[in-house]
Amino acid sequence: MLRVFAAFTALLLGSMPAASAASEATLVLKRTSASFPNGDPRWQLQLMREGKVLQSWTAAASARRHQALDRLWTPGNGSPLPRGSYRLGLPEPWGRDIWMQLDPLFATRRSGLGIHNCYPGVGCICIPDRQQLSRLADAVRRYQVTRLRVVD
């Protein structure tokens, strides 16, 4: 009984990870070596849990000409998202589109970031195929995804 109480107290105080945190799903955005027919780079958005890719989607994260621009401090320049972790909002209607808000969990002047259907990408994560965006939104809801990490 004392051992259970100690584990519960440690969990409440944050010194022990919750069991659900270990199986928490997250989205990871990675640059690939492939490109779209116009030369814009293809990115891969992966749904990960416990080190395994559950699903993935082709994405655009910026036009080819914007890849080398300042990713952290210059809003509106169309560069790819800065590397780091983001809070992911729930999918919501955005006109005839779907929008998933991205809030950086680090210091930056970039704002108005999200995942939606567009092409070419100019600063957000764009899922060019509308059906794939709907599948991504379904997965975000099903797996209760609240985090995204940009690794490149």
Image (cartoon, helix red, strand yellow):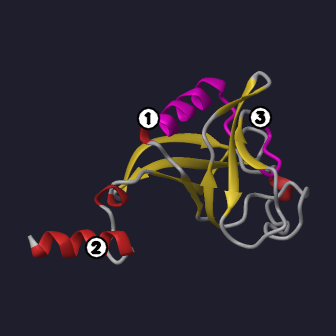
Instruction: Indicate which disc, 2 or 3, sits on the residue closer to the N terminus.
Output: 2
Q: Quadrant of residue 106?
A: bottom right
Quadrant assignment for the N terminus: bottom left
Q: Name the one closer to the observer, 21 or 117.
A: 21
What segment carries the magenta color? 119-141
Q: Is residue 39 above or below residue 95?
A: below
Q: Residue at x 22, y 72 (%)?
A: 7
Q: Are marks 3 and 1 in contact (CB under 8 Å)?
A: no
Q: Nearer the viewer, residue 7 or 133?
A: 7
**Residue 27 % position (x, y):** 52, 51
At horizontal 63% and vertical 50% (from top left) the residue drawn is 43
In this rendering, would 20 be left or right of 105?
left
The residue where tag 3 is placed is 118
- Above or below: residue 135 compared with residue 106: above
Residue that numbered label 2 is attached to: 9
How many numbered callouts?
3
